[in-house]
Amino acid sequence: MVVFKVARLETTPFDGQKPGTSGLRKKVKVFIQPNYLQNFVQSTFNALTPEKVRGATLVVSGDGRYFSKDAIQIIIKMAAANGVRRIWVGQNGLLSTPAVSAVIRERVGIDGSRASGGFILTASHNPGGPHEDFGIKYNMENGGPSPEGITDKIYENTKTIKEYLIAEDLPDVDISTTGVTSFGGPEGQFDVEVFDSASDYVKLMKSIFDFESIRKLLSSLNFTFCFDALHGVAGAYAKRIFVEELGAQASSLLNCTPKEDFGGGHPDPNLTYAKELVARMGLGKSNPQDEPPEFGAAADGDADRNMILGKRFFVTPSDSVAIIAANAVEAIPYFSAGLKGVARSMPTSAALDVVAKHLNLKFFEVPTGWKFFGNLMDAGLCSVCGEESFGTGSDHIREKDGIWAVLAWLSILAHKNKENLHGEKLVTVEDIVRQHWATYGRHYYTRYDYENVDAGAAKELMVYLVKLQSSLLEVDEIVKGTRSDVSKVVHADEFEYKDPVDGSISKHQGIRYLFEDGSRLVFRLSGTGSEGATIRLYIEQYEKDPSKIDRDSQDALAPLVEVALRLSKMKEFTGRTTPTVIT
Ligand code: G6P
Ligand code: ZN
């Protein structure tokens, strides 16, 4: 057994190591500066209570992006020096964000050990490669991201750090083959266990969904399927689950080999970046050569986001979570006893609210950020939740889960088509969505993003919008002066949330204008942008009349968009006449 020594190395603080709820995300060239990663990792260890470090079992893995392999070796050496007992690594350093959550919550090691937390190495849907982004975040023993108390402490530590501990002479561990490597240190044995990245996650999915009924759907002659991993870590799970377990054709998988630079692409599952899938599904500019598949889906770099498509049909994330909630009890065995409650983030459309009301479910509207759902789930208040930003999930883990969302949709399709698998006409994704609208009404919804706006200008715009809220009369004059066909503003505020579990209050979570007919305008500054500021404008209109639910969404929303731009003086403040991205 190799014996290592502990070195205490001097260091000085770096500016700007404040982790958001999604961790610390920076360009690779920032992360590879000597001591940059080391400072953050040591600051994290120092922010945890000693028993969560000394003698603990921790997970270290991620989406496999550039610099991950080096980072894993550094973290292993630092963990050894800090008295950690065991490090678990997914084979080749790969674990999706939802899989890390599952592994922390469920996995039992070869020697019966359980993990109490883990480092996830990812910058999610941001591009990867030597000139792109890297990221790191720490998840706690419930499998969810560190709460603000911890991330604040980490940040404070990064500002005063003077030294870090590292086992410099520990040889690099081979993370390409599964097995345990043991070392001896001043405090006793230290093990690194490399394990199959998919097994634990596959086991969990099999305990939630009826794989047999999905297998029947996927193997039926009239159902066709396509999944795009955008060269992210979802590829490692897609092959195992969709092909090996569920019998999909290997040709159904697009870009399912994880790559350090995501093949040069932007691993974000939306209509702009998932170009190949969008074209194959018949939603591109030109018609595809082959008939599009019945169902298509994509996930982001670390496989926590998802996009759901039907043949020539886009399902908005807000509709997706509402439809999953409406069908969960019947279609997904995990929920057969009923849903404990449902939740959405504030800017997400109210489609879920209507389902909750119909089904008499507990309902929560939380600020943007998955951590708010985690609290509700830990308290047994929420089973299914989702966000407009392509995140959907449930209380099976404490992260959003891209593959889970795909399996949820496949379960609903399998359930609706139980009798139709022998050549009869299928109930399609589009049918399911249209039936949903017919029952619950439709929430027309769109999001305008103004990226990389001057930060000062963005702030001024937000201040102006808050000030405007003091006089609804004035607001209504502007509204009526812009479009007479838009209804009256009945309420305007800044969204504030009191967590029903821990009582904490989150203020300034987005500016809302609520209209008499249920329409809504929301303005928010993105918390995840890396340059300048990103203003997000969320536009929503509710339509109950079944004769009016089939319009083109951009057409239906055009009057509200006009009002939003006038109300916010978007052009005057930012100089922008068009948004950078529309989703
Ligand atoms: C991350 C979080 C999500 C959140 C999103 C918002 O993806 O995991 O929970 O919805 O960021 O991003 P934004 O840029 O709108 O702050
Ligand atoms: Zn992600």
Image (cartoon, helix red, strand yellow):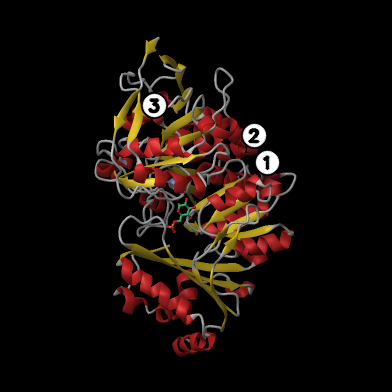
Tell me the element at label 2. helix
Q: Amino acid at mark 3?
A: Ile
Q: Nearer the viewer, mark 3 or mark 1?
A: 3
Query: Which residue is tagged 1?
Result: 334
Disc on res. 207: 2
Seen at 55% across and 46% down, the residue is 405
Q: Earlier in the sequence, mark 3 or mark 1?
A: 3
Spot occupied by residue 495 in the image (x, y as percentages of width and height)? 54, 67
Lower position in the chain sequence, tag 3 or tag 2: 3
Location of residue 451 (image quadrant): bottom left
Question: In the rendered view, would you say 272 is above or below 438?
Answer: above
Label 1 sits on a secondary structure element that is helix
Q: Residue at x 63, y 50 (%)?
A: 376
Q: Position of residue 561 (x, y in %)?
A: 44, 76
Q: CA distance from mark 3 to mark 2?
A: 32 Å
- For the C terminus, the image quarter is bottom left
Tell me if 201 is positioned left or right of 44 in this view: right
Tally the marks.
3
Label 3 belongs to which residue? Answer: 76
Q: Which mark is residue 144?
A: none
Q: Identify which amino acid the numbered label 1 is placed on.
A: Tyr
Going from the N terminus, do you reach mark 1 or mark 2 first?
2
Horizontal side of residue 118 vs 543, given as left or right: left
Residue 256 visible in rendering: no
Describe residue 354's horizontal placement relative to residue 198 as left or right. right
Residue located 40% across and 50% down the image: 268
Gap between marks 3 and 1 measured at Cα: 36 Å
Q: Amino acid at mark 2?
A: Ser
Q: CB under 8 Å between callouts 1 and 2?
A: yes
- Depth order, front residue of 505/119: 505
Q: Position of residue 98 (x, y in %)?
A: 51, 40
Q: Secondary structure at mark 3?
A: helix
